[in-house]
Amino acid sequence: MKNRIVRAVAGIFILTSLLLAVYVNIHWLWFTAFVGLNLFQSSLTKWCLMETILEKFGVKD
């Protein structure tokens, strides 16, 4: 369950930042890059802050 939530949140962040870049300011693409960098970092280190936050809220695997 945690894995699905992490993927959903990442997808929502990316789509939201893309919409903000198109309709508000192009600099919102930096947020898209930040989310992508965090996804890449978590694939290398096997640690994700969102998973830690979800664990504290009691979400099970």
Image: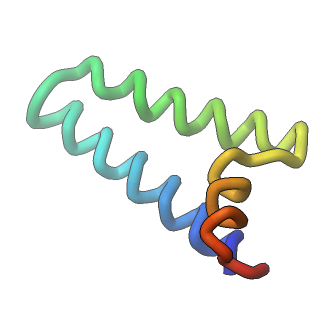
The spot of residue 31 in percent (x, y) is 41, 29
Q: Is residue 33 above or below residue 6?
A: above
| Image-based side of 44 in relation to 17, left or right | right
Q: Is residue 40 above or below residue 12?
A: above
The spot of residue 22 in percent (x, y) is 17, 35
Question: In terms of image quadrants, where is residue 27?
Answer: top left
Q: Residue furthest top?
A: 27
Residue drawn at (49%, 60%), measured in percent from left and top?
9
Residue drawn at (67%, 75%), measured in percent from left and top?
58
Please tell me which residue lies in front, 49 or 19: 49
Please tell me which residue lies in front, 47 or 26: 47
Mark count: 0
The spot of residue 61 in percent (x, y) is 78, 80
Please tell me which residue lies in front, 22 or 11: 11
Residue drawn at (68%, 81%), measured in percent from left and top?
1
| Image-based side of 60 in relation to 25, left or right | right
| Image-based side of 16 in relation to 20, left or right | right
Q: Is residue 45 above or below residue 16?
A: above
Residue drawn at (70%, 58%), measured in percent from left and top?
51
